[in-house]
Amino acid sequence: MVEVSTSILNIEKGKEADTFLKLEIAKTDYFHIDVMDGKFVEKNTYNKMLENSEYIKRISNLPLDVHLMVEDVKKSIDDFLAVNPNIITFHLEACKDKSEIYEIIQYIKNNNCKVGIAIKPDTNIEEIFEFLPYIHMCLVMTVEPGKGGQTLITDMINKIKMLKEHIDNEKLEIDIEVDGGINLRTAPEVKKAGANILVAGTAIIVAKDFKVIIDELKKGINIF
């Protein structure tokens, strides 16, 4: 079963409440919270995402899927634990060494939250293998993190396949989330490669009917 995590990154200012409600009615599975600090990536969405997360928790029971694109991972975890997220995902590349990665994994778990690790397009998929038994999700970035509306880097399809093959061989129970350039054209390919959670922002938010797009993304059917 493929799930959809809708990125709220590019929701029009002033229409947040209406959009969140419509997304819930359309049965998105998660609200995807793109947290950027202006350092790890150029864009800074930190305060905006914290405010939106706090608001979502007041009006919705849908889970928050928090993606930290930040340098100070520990501080960001503390800030976003306050909104009771379902999962917090941090970047492998934001950590100085393996011991820090393990420390962060345990810290998130100790705070009763699921944990994910994200990798950028240039990071070899093998670098994450040793951490997979200890986390709930691996997020494969199929674009460079930090901007919405980018085109999926097709070379990343093979990376997803390699990850899925390793997970199956090791008999691990872990989600594969894919973020970047996901739309009705690319969804079937990433699903076939092994992804079971699709992050989509632009493809959903610009649509006239959120439910139509979300349903099609879950099916993974190429309608073109």
Image: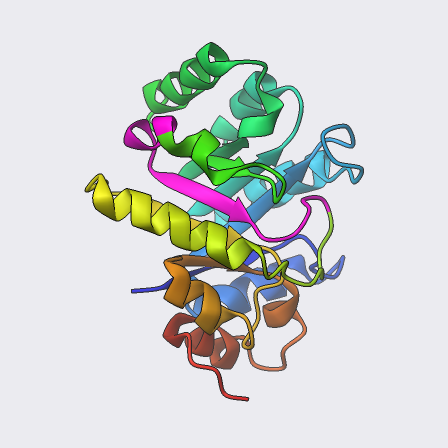
Q: Is residue 97 above or below residue 56?
A: above
**Residue that appears at 51% across and 66% down:** 23
Q: Please state the horizontal and vertical placement of residue 77, each as a whole percent of the image.
A: 53, 24
**Residue that appears at 72% across and 31% down:** 37
Question: In the rendered view of the protein, which quadrant contains the C terminus?
Answer: bottom right
**Residue that appears at 61% across and 59% down:** 17
Q: Please state the horizontal and vertical placement of residue 140, each as a whole percent of the image.
A: 51, 47
**Residue that appears at 60% across and 27% down:** 93
Q: Is residue 193 above or below residue 107?
A: below
Question: In the rendered view of the protein, which quadrant contains the N terminus?
Answer: bottom left
Is 197 on the left or on the right of 185, as rendered?
A: left
On whether residue 216 falls in the magenta region, the answer is: no
Q: Nearer the viewer, residue 177 or 171?
A: 171
Count the marks. 0
On whether residue 134 falls in the magenta region, the answer is: yes
Q: Is residue 160 above or below residue 74?
A: below
- In the picture as drawn, the residue positioned furthest to the top comes out as 99
Q: Nearer the viewer, residue 222 or 80?
A: 222
Q: Within the image, what quadrant is residue 94 found in?
A: top right
Colour setup of the view: rainbow
Is 214 on the left or on the right of 49, as rendered?
A: left
State which region is magenta.
Answer: 130-146
Q: Please state the horizontal and vertical placement of residue 6, each as a whole percent of the image.
A: 53, 59
Kindly tell me whether residue 214 is visible in this rendering.
yes
Q: Is residue 140 above or below residue 158?
A: above
